[in-house]
Image (cartoon, coloured by chain):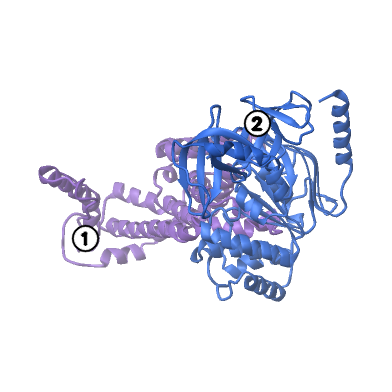
C-alpha cells in the first residue's frame, strides 16, 4: 500500500478499519475464484471435496464432444458477431463524433440502451423479435426459419455495437481533429485522410472494442439461452445446463478455461487501448 | 460626410470590387462568412501580392483565422469570391488548392516518423516514392533537422516540431503558404529566432506567406504588409510603418503599439481643440466640428520640468502640464505616467545620460513636435481601457 500523503492518510482505528475492509472486499472477489481453480484439480467426484491432485477433469473436458461442439459454436458466434459489431460500432462512433445530423441526440441515447437495460429484458426482447419476425417471414414469403446460430449472432451484434462504439468514440474524441484537416490540406482525399490518419489513430480503440465484444459474446448466457435453438448451444449455455443435470467437477475445469480466456481478452483489450496513448495524446 | 462624398466612396468601392489585380496571389472580393447567426468575416476585400509576406492581425475572434481557413479551403465563404492566382477556389476542397498550411499546434501525424510526415503531401499527390524521399530529405535539411528523419513527433521539442510542420508544408512547393499563429506555442527566445528564420526562408523561396497572428509586434517585425481585423471587419491594410504612423481609426491606433489617444474636435486652419480647450496645430482634412483623437505615441513625447514650460513652447512644439504619477524603469527606457487634469498620458523616455530624471509628484510638462501626432477619426471603436 502506498500512502497518498502523510497528512491525508488516516491513523489508528480508521486506518485499521479501512484496511480490513479492503481485505474483505478482496476476499469476496477472489476466494470463490481461488476455490474454483483449486477444485478443478481435485480428484474427487464431488465438486467441493479435495481428493488429491489430478488433471482428469481437464482431460474429460478435452474429450467431451458435446463440450467441444458448444465451444466451437461459442467461438464462431463470438468472432462473427464481433466482426459485424466492430464495423457498425465504429461507423456509429464516427457519425456521432464527426457529423451533425437530425436526431443525433436520440441516436446517441439509444446507442447506450443495450449497456443499461438488464440482460433478461434484452433476451426477452430478442426472443419476441425473432418469434414475430420468423412468423411474418413465414406468412409472407413462406420462409421457414428457426432460432439457432443466426439468431444468436444477431443478438450478440445488437449489444456489442454499443460497447464497440463507446470505446471507439472515446478514442475518437481524444483525437486531434486538426490532423484530418492537415491531411486534406496535404492533398489527401477524404478517404485517404481516413485511411492514413484517422484509422491508425483510432485503431487501438477499435482493437480494444473488438476484444471487449469478443469477451462479452463468449461470456453471455442469458441472451444466448433465450434465442438459441437445437444444435446451437454455446459453451456458457452448455455449462449452465450441466449444473441442472448434475454436477461433475468437469464444470470447474470448463469454468477455469473460460475464466482464463476472458481475463486474457480483457487484459489484451486494456493493453490495446493504452498502447500508443502517448502518441495519440500528442500533436 | 456629405451625400456627394458618400456617393464617390460607394463608386470607388464598386470599382474596387470590379478590379481584380492580375498579379495577386490571393484575392478576396466581398468575402463573408457566417456561422449560424454569427458573422465571423464581414464583406472583406483584400489582395495579397505574389511573393509577399502578409500578416492578418487582430485580437482573438476577429475573423483572421476564419479568413485564413477560407483561403486554405477548410471553411467555405458564405458570400463573395476568392481567387488564388486568378482561379476561383470558393468551394474547392483543400486537397485541390495550391496552398499548404502550417497549423497552430502543428498537427503533425503522431503515428508517423518525421520523414513520413514530410513525404505525406507528395505521396498523396502521387509523386514516386524515391522522388518524394529525395525532396523530403532536402526539405528536412532546409529546416536543419538532418538526422532526425526517423524520430516520432513526440520525441521532438516544440521548436523542432514547428520546423517539421514547416518542411511538411513547403516540400509541396505551394504557391501560397498559410501560417496560423505558427509561433504561438514557442517561448520568447525561440519565437524571436524563428521569426528571423521564417522571414529569410520566405525571401529565399519567394513564396507568398500569409500569416495569422494576434501579436502586433510579431506582425510589425516580419511582414511586408499587414491587414488589421476586428469583429469580422477589415480595418486597414498597409505596410508596418504606415500602420504605426498613420492608423485609420482608434482601434488600429490602440491595437498597434502603445498609444495615447487625446480626444479633440477639428477646427479650421489645421487646428484641433483638445478636450481641455487647448488648441493644437496639426494637419487634417476633416470637416470643422468633427470628433477625432490625436494619437501620440509614448516615445514621441517627452517630459520636461515645469520651469522649462516657456522654453518648450518656443521650440514650436506643444505642451501639456501635469504631475508625474508613476515611474517605471525598464532598463532601456523610463515610462512616466503623467496625470493631466483631464486624462493620463504615458511617456517613454530613452535611458540616455542627460535625459531628465523625474520622480512621483514632480510637476512637469509633456511636450511633442507637431509632426509627431496622427489624427484618427473618432469612430467610437475600442478605447485603451481594456488593453494591458
B208 or A30, which is in the foreground? B208
**Which residue is disc 2 drawn over?**
B381
Sort mark 2 into few (<14), some (14-19) or many (20+) by Cα contacts within 10 Å.
Answer: few
In this rendering, the count of numbered labels is 2
Other residues around mark 1 within 10 Å, as few (<14) / some (14–19) / many (≥20) = some
Tell me which residue sits at (57%, 44%) in the image: A97
Who's purple, chain-wise?
A
Q: Is residue B148 above or below residue A158?
A: below
Specify the quadrant that holds the N terminus of chain B. top right
| Chain label for disc 1 | A
Determine whether, in the image, residue A259 is placed left or right of residue B6.
Answer: left
Q: B346 above or below A31?
A: above
Q: Position of residue B38 (x, y in %)?
A: 66, 32
Residue A244 appears in the picture as rendered: yes
- In the image, taking residue B346 as reference, residue B249 lies left or right, namely right
Q: Position of residue B313 (x, y in %)?
A: 64, 37
Q: Which chain is blue?
A: B
Residue name at image x 72 percent, y 38 percent: B248
Judging depth in this view, the residue of A164 and B55 nearest the camera is: B55
User: Could you say where residue A195 lies in the image, as x and y percent from the top left?
Assistant: 63, 59
Kindly identify which residue carries mark 1: A38
Amino acid at each position: 500500500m502506498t500512502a497518498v500523503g502523510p497528512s491525508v492518510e488516516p491513523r489508528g482505528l480508521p486506518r485499521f478499519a479501512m484496511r480490513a475492509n479492503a481485505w474483505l472486499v478482496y476476499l469476496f472477489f477472489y476466494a470463490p475464484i481461488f476455490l474454483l481453480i483449486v477444485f478443478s484439480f481435485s480428484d474427487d467426484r464431488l465438486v467441493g471435496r479435495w481428493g488429491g491432485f489430478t488433471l482428469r477433469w481437464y482431460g474429460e473436458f478435452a474429450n467431451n464432444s458435446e463440450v467441444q461442439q458448444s465451444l466451437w459454436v461459442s467461438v464462431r458466434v463470438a468472432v462473427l458477431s464481433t466482426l459485424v459489431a466492430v464495423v457498425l460500432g465504429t461507423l456509429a462512433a464516427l457519425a456521432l463524433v464527426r457529423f451533425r445530423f437530425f436526431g443525433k441526440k436520440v441516436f446517441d441515447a439509444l446507442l447506450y440502451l443495450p449497456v443499461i437495460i438488464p440482460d433478461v429484458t434484452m433476451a426477452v426482447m430478442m426472443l419476441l423479435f425473432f418469434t414475430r419476425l420468423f412468423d411474418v417471414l413465414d406468412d409472407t414469403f413462406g420462409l421457414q426459419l428457426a432460432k439457432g446460430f443466426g439468431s444468436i449472432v444477431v443478438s450478440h451484434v445488437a449489444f456489442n455495437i454499443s460497447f464497440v462504439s463507446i470505446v471507439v468514440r472515446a478514442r475518437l474524441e481524444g483525437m486531434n481533429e486538426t490532423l484530418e484537416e492537415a491531411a486534406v490540406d496535404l492533398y489527401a482525399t477524404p478517404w485517404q485522410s481516413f485511411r492514413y490518419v484517422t484509422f491508425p489513430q483510432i485503431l487501438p480503440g477499435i482493437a480494444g472494442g473488438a476484444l471487449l465484444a469478443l469477451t462479452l459474446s463468449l461470456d453471455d448466457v442469458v441472451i444466448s439461452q433465450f434465442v438459441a435453438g437445437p444444435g446451437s448451444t454455446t459453451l456458457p449455455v452448455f455449462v449452465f445446463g450441466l449444473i441442472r443435470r448434475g454436477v461433475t467437477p468437469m464444470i470447474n475445469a470448463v469454468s477455469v478455461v473460460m475464466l482464463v480466456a476472458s481475463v486474457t481478452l480483457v487484459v489484451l483489450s486494456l493493453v490495446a487501448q493504452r498502447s500508443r496513448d502517448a502518441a495519440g495524446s500528442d500533436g | 460626410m456629405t451625400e456627394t462624398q458618400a456617393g464617390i466612396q460607394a463608386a470607388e468601392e464598386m470599382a474596387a470590387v470590379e478590379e481584380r489585380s492580375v498579379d495577386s496571389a490571393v484575392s478576396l472580393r466581398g468575402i463573408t462568412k457566417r456561422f449560424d447567426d454569427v458573422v465571423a468575416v464581414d464583406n472583406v476585400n483584400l489582395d495579397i501580392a505574389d511573393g509577399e509576406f502578409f500578416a492578418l492581425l487582430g485580437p482573438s475572434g476577429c475573423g483572421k483565422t476564419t479568413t485564413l481557413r477560407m483561403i486554405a479551403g477548410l471553411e467555405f465563404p458564405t458570400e463573395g469570391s476568392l481567387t488564388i492566382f486568378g482561379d476561383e477556389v470558393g468551394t474547392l476542397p483543400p486537397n485541390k488548392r495550391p496552398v499548404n498550411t502550417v497549423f497552430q499546434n502543428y498537427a503533425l501525424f503522431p503515428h508517423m516518423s518525421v520523414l513520413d510526415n514530410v513525404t505525406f503531401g507528395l505521396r498523396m499527390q502521387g509523386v514516386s516514392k524515391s522522388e518524394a524521399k529525395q525532396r523530403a530529405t532536402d526539405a528536412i535539411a532546409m529546416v536543419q533537422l538532418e538526422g532526425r528523419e526517423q524520430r516520432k513527433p513526440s520525441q521532438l521539442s516544440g521548436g523542432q516540431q514547428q520546423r517539421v510542420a514547416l518542411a511538411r508544408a513547403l516540400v509541396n512547393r505551394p504557391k501560397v503558404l498559410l501560417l496560423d499563429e505558427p509561433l504561438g506555442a514557442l517561448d520568447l527566445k525561440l519565437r524571436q529566432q524563428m521569426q528571423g528564420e521564417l522571414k529569410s526562408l520566405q525571401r529565399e523561396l519567394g513564396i507568398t506567406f500569409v500569416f495569422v497572428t494576434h501579436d502586433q509586434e510579431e506582425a510589425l517585425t516580419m511582414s511586408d504588409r499587414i491587414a488589421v481585423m476586428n469583429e469580422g471587419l477589415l480595418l486597414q491594410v498597409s505596410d508596418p510603418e504606415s500602420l504605426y504612423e498613420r492608423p485609420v481609426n482608434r482601434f488600429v491606433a490602440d491595437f498597434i503599439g502603445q498609444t495615447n489617444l487625446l480626444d479633440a474636435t477639428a477646427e479650421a486652419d489645421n487646428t484641433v481643440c483638445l478636450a481641455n480647450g487647448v488648441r493644437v496645430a496639426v494637419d487634417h482634412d476633416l470637416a470643422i466640428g468633427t470628433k477625432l483623437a490625436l494619437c501620440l505615441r509614448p516615445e514621441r513625447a517627452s517630459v520636461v520640468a515645469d520651469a522649462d514650460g516657456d522654453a518648450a513652447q518656443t521650440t514650436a512644439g506643444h505642451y501639456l502640464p501635469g504631475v508625474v504619477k508613476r515611474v517605471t524603469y525598464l532598463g532601456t527606457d523610463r515610462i512616466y505616467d503623467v496625470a493631466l487634469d483631464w486624462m493620463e498620458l504615458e511617456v517613454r523616455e530613452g535611458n540616455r545620460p542627460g535625459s531628465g530624471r523625474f520622480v512621483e509628484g514632480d510637476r512637469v510638462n509633456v511636450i511633442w513636435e507637431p509632426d509627431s501626432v496622427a489624427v484618427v477619426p473618432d469612430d467610437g471603436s475600442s478605447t485603451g481601457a481594456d488593453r494591458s
